[in-house]
Image (cartoon, grey):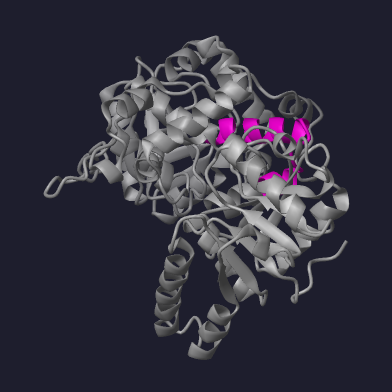
Amino acid sequence: MSALQQNTVVGVIGAGAMGAGIAQVAAQAGHSVKLYDNRDGAASSAIDAMAKQLAKLVERQKFTTEQVQQILSRLEVVSSLNDLANAGLVVEAIVENVDVKKAIFDTLESVCATDCIIASNTSSISITRLAAGMQHPERMIGMHFFNPAPIMKLVEVVSGLATDSTVAACIYETASNWGKKPVHAASTPGFIVNRVARPFYAESFRLCQEHVADCATLDALIKSAGGFRMGAFELTDMIGHDVNYAVTCSVFDAYYGDFRFQPSLIQKDLVDAGFLGRKTGQGFYSYQEGVEKPKAQFSPASSVPATPIKCQVSKDMGHLTGLVERLAQAGIQVTQESSLAPGYLKVGDAWLALTDGRMACERAIDEQLSDLVLVDLALDYLAVEHIALSRSASTSDKSFEDVVTCFDLAGIKISEVEDSPALVVMRTVAMLANEAADAVLQGVATAEGVDTAMCFGLNYPKGPLAWADSIGVAKVNAVLHQLQLSYGEDRYRPSLLMRRTAMTGGYFHGE
């Protein structure tokens, strides 16, 4: 089944931020749109607000005045669900309440033609459950947009057990015609994005709870070394802790208490205190007038050494090859030493290596290294400006200072964090990849679909599974294994698909 024709009338129920945004997207794509809201004046106010926003886009030369007039002319406020009788697609975007939504769908089935597709923008309710009891459950589908809908590219096209595959194909093609990045998803708790994203928040919260580093430092590391647009603390402050915590609890409960989705105690404390983030003026950070946001903590570099710093590297530096290039570009003398184990480099007496999931103290004992410093993962070692290091208890201050000075000469700021399994970015990326792998294993989406969803729904710098491929699936699996050994918790168990791919030397996206 191909995409809906441009002359198909689209109905949108709910004139809140999401409903109004969806109506705008459909109108921009050339459809006549009927907007309904049971609150007096809500739909008209939404269109008025839309007109003001579009006028600003005219000023920025994103649209012409004529184009905006055409878009607005396609929008019609209706006062009754009966007015949606000629719609070929109706998208519901109202309160997340099963009974309220099902009542709406019952009415739509009595009003709309049997070939009208009925879609829900729900972010958390099972499409299978919403379709249960409908006369034609095969036409019920999830069409999950992301806020703000006119800007965010992703649309999760969610099929329930009864959804006709031709309906899913039609909505996929329609979303694509509307300028979106659609991905197919099965109706499971959290769909793709809200499920796979849980570790992004959970691991930062746990690192903070364990005093590995403070919120500002963790956020800065996730952004600089990880390439994410926001860290977990500032992002959840913006979302609202009541909302973010509720989603986590919902996914946790839906998976019968699977500890992979365990909510955070420090976030619960914020919710209990009413510190919900920006909207209340206090979350992990204070947003009160005159209060300065805390800054990341950096390890100070020593003064420029009297003699040039020399660095010895092994023949195979693996994922740290970019870092070695960066040091050489900074004028640091880098020589290859065949006696060094793969992946190691030496600065003075200090041994450096990419974290493999073990704590530095554990790895130093295992490999009998007295001055061990572990380096965190970075999206791009040639461009990174700030990265985390940790050291074993046996590493001297002098050796660590030499490493910090070496990185400083290469233009990289260092935050020393407490010795913790897999550090910060590696830990976060490994857990995101693990959850993504489990979603693929369970048929929620394809590997391509998961990565597309995370990049276009949450602006991730790289899809979790593509990232695992670039690191090496076997290495990511080893990191997860070490995390599980360190904590003794099911939370860190490697996905069966992650283990199988690692064992066979495969990739999530082919070779």
Q: What residue is shown at x 71% (from left), y 34% (from top)?
A: 129
Q: What residue is shown at x 40% (from left), y 16% (from top)?
A: 370
Question: What is the magenta range?
Answer: 428-451
Q: Indicate yes or no whether the magenta region holds residue 431.
A: yes
Left or right of 138? Residue 484 is: left
Q: Is residue 65 above or below residue 205?
A: below
Q: Is residue 187 above or below residue 83?
A: above
Q: Residue furthest bottom?
A: 66
The quarter in which the N terminus is drawn is bottom right
The quarter in which the C terminus is drawn is top right
Q: Position of residue 202 (x, y in %)?
A: 47, 29
Q: How many marks can you see?
A: 0
Judge by depth and name the residue closer to the eye, 366 or 337: 366
Left or right of 436? Residue 441 is: right
Question: Residue 231's quadrant in the figure?
Answer: top left
Q: Residue furthest left?
A: 290
Question: Residue 254's quadrant in the figure?
Answer: top right
Q: Position of residue 456 (x, y in %)?
A: 59, 55
Q: Position of residue 249 (x, y in %)?
A: 50, 26
Residue 403 seen by the camera: yes
Judge by depth and name the residue closer to the eye, 219 or 40: 40
Judge by depth and name the residue closer to the eye, 6 or 474: 6
Judge by depth and name the residue closer to the eye, 190 or 473: 190
Q: What residue is shown at x 30% (from left), y 40% (from top)?
A: 277
Q: What residue is shown at x 31% (from left), y 34% (from top)?
A: 215
Q: Is residue 134 above or below residue 359?
A: below
Identify the main secondary structure in magenta: helix
Q: Indicate yes or no whether the magenta region holds residue 190.
A: no
Residue 355 seen by the camera: no
Left or right of 169? Residue 374 is: left
Q: Position of residue 307 (x, y in %)?
A: 28, 43
